Amino acid sequence: MELFIVFVFILGYLGITLEHSLKVDKLVPSLLMMAFAWAGVSLGLDDFTMWFDSAGHQLLDITGMGNDERMHLMEETLLHHFGKTSEILIFLIGAMTIVEIIDHFHGFSAIKGFIKTNKKRTLLWIVAFLAFVLSAIIDNLTATIVLITILRKLLSNSEDRIWFAGLIVICANAGGAWSPIGDVTTTMLWMGNKVTALKLMEFLLIPSLICMIIPTLIASFMKPFQGNFELPEEDGVTNSKASMMLYLGLAMIVFVPIFKTIFHLPPYVGMMLSLGVVALFAETISVRQFKMTYVGNVNNGKNSDKIAEKPAEHHESPTFRALTKIEMPSILFFLGILMTVAALESLGLVFNFGQSVQNSMHDDVFVMLLGAGSAVIDNVPLVAASMGMFNAPIDDHIWQFIAYSAGTGGSMLIIGSAAGVVAMGMEKISFFWYLKNISWLALIGYLGGAGFYLLERAL
């Protein structure tokens, strides 16, 4: 039965990696392999001799257990993993909703005001640092979407934009690696009590900065980033409350690690508090804007018959609107992936593999390979599996190095990260164009940051 579960995982993962070829959203194979994997665990429960205790990080001998005891153990394990997975998913839902509320008020359009140049090289550095900083706060995927959207308003030439988009992917992934809320994988390690926010930032900020600066510096001397571009005229779309909602939303997301440090509560509790505060301001602003519009229309006599029939308290809720726009397919994909890895972990397969790896190669070499592998295979299951492989204390260098490698290694291929995939879709970047023009820059940045981190820890 163990071979069946491994086969299900491999088959499901092929479905995920071939998403674009099969034209089937990756959440489908993710959910199917989760269900089949746990069904396999249930069917083979009587035959298993070992069981992995994730809380104690040790293998248990269950040879002498009866059927009822085994069933109870499986249910407890399933509930434990579902609880830990749900913490991550609720956290992500809260963060996504805050981002959508900011976008509802056109908050991200305020970022365009930071760009006052018409030189491509200067624009590259501005965009690079914005990607690095924004991704650390609102995650690398959202930062990529926001910046490419802004670029579309600045650069009319699509050939220029794809070069900038390629560098945004590298910078956004680098920015997400040093922040506990910047990437799904760092969030997983943080919420799994493998790293603390302060130590993660202390040891990964400079390596991540190097990973961003080296490719950007090299690219700034390349021909696509030379010369000038024509600044567009102001479109006047920015909402009067845009800047306020942008700064409020970003501040409340940054507050989450502070909340955890002060109250020692799980991060999703702090994220729900932040969402509540942002939603309160959003609803208040929305109601006031609606009433002002309503009263103005009444005073002007516009559509008086229809206005009289519509109560002033009926307005479009920005919170409800934001909840309808969050990426539920991504949430379900993470659910399927994490729970499938949990099934493999429960049978001790992940732990045994980790022991074999540690006996055959140095941990740092393995993590470097993990980073390179994340360019081909999604980094979420790789990090989820690594969390079951190593029995290292919190803030051990192995966890920090995993966060860096998994977060930045995916930049080496356009399909290696969520930021890359969304850039690929938004700007129609081909796999081979990215491989030829951007991948070598990402590799140099990855190796530069990794080298600095290893040297930093050695000293």
Image (cartoon, rainbow, N blue to C red):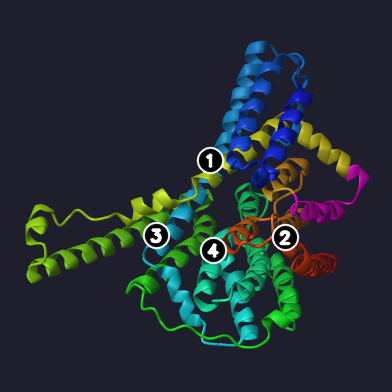
Q: Could you tell me residue 198's position as x and y percent?
A: 63, 63
426 and 81: which one is in front? 426
Q: How far is mark 1 from mark 2, CA to CA?
A: 24 Å
Is 16 rendered above or below residue 42? Answer: below
Foreground label between 4 and 1? 4
Q: Quadrant of the N terminus?
A: top right
Q: Could you tell me residue 50's position as x and y percent?
A: 77, 23
Q: Name the residue under label 2.
A: 404
Amino acid at pointer 2 = Tyr
Q: How far is mark 4 from mark 3, CA to CA?
A: 15 Å
100 and 69: which one is in front? 100
Q: Is mark 4 on a helix, strand or loop?
A: helix
Amino acid at pointer 4 = Ile
Residue 421, quarter of picture: bottom right
Q: Residue at x 75, y 75 (%)?
A: 214
Q: How far is mark 1 from mark 3, CA to CA?
A: 22 Å
Answer with mark 2 or mark 4, whichever residue precedes in sequence: 4
Q: Name the residue under label 1.
A: 86
Foreground label between 2 and 4? 4
- Contact (Cβ within 8 Å) of mark 4 with mark 1: no
Q: Residue at x 83, y 64 (%)?
A: 454
- State whether the magenta stretch is mostly helix, strand or loop: helix
Q: Name the residue under label 3.
A: 101
Residues packed near mark 2 inside 10 Å, few (<14), some (14 to 19) or many (20 plus): many
Q: Which range is magenta?
A: 358-376
Foreground label between 3 and 2? 3
Q: Could you tell me residue 361's position as x and y percent?
A: 91, 48
